[in-house]
Image (cartoon, rainbow, N blue to C red):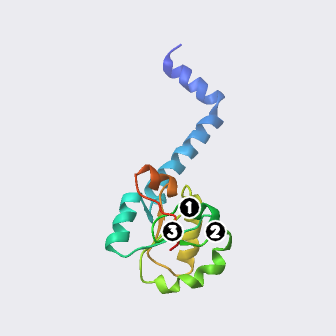
Amino acid sequence: MSLFSQLIEFLGNHWFLFVALAIILALLTHNLIVGNKGSVGPLQATEMMNHQDAVVIDVRPAADYAKGHILGAINLPINGFANQLATLNKYRGKPIIVNCRSGASSSMACGQLRKAGFEAVYNLQGGIMAWEAAGQPLTRKKA
């Protein structure tokens, strides 16, 4: 029995695994191509803060924010974020970088900001964890 015929037999017996693999690969490819649109890494965020006067919004709980945050970051916890969008209107013309612990909650907050009409909104890829891993500083001083 040749390798090709064994592969065909395996494919016939386990077609659902191949369908699942194809779906996963398609989703990963889509995420790589489209998913990082509107995201910035720690070094790019620093450059935006220094040269474009970007505003940093930290959506972690206040207790996590108090343990250490990006210098100048404004704390608006995700659980009440939608109710506090009006406080960000004064930053409408500036780039806004949103961060959380790992990048998941901040991604949702970015979506809410875009729906509210904010245009230059960026998610910090990897959140505070990536920020620290890149050797960027945190502070405990309130903004």
Residue nearer the viewer, 40 or 88:
88
Crowding at dot 3, Cα within 10 Å, few <14 / some 14-19 / many 20+, comes out as: some
Q: Disc 1 marks which residue?
A: 100
Q: Disc 3 marks which residue?
A: 141
Pick whichever of labels 2 and 3 is earlier in the sequence.
2
Amino acid beneath label 3: Lys
Mark 1 element type: loop
Crowding at dot 1, Cα within 10 Å, few <14 / some 14-19 / many 20+, comes out as: many
Q: Do the residues bearing badges 2 and 1 touch, measured as CB atoms within 8 Å?
A: yes
Q: Position of residue 86 (x, y in %)?
A: 59, 85
Which of the 4 image quadrants contains residue 17?
A: top right
CA gap between label 1 and label 3 equals 17 Å
Q: Position of residue 38 (x, y in %)?
A: 45, 66
Q: Disc 2 marks which residue?
A: 78
Residue at the front extreme of this rendering:
141
In percent of the image, x 50 and y 15: which residue is there? 2
Count of all numbered marks drawn on residues in the image: 3
Amino acid beneath label 2: Ile
User: What label does residue 111 carry, if any?
Assistant: none
Pick whichever of labels 2 and 1 is earlier in the sequence.
2
Residue nearer the viewer, 30 or 82:
82
Q: Position of residue 114 (x, y in %)?
A: 53, 75
Amino acid beneath label 1: Cys
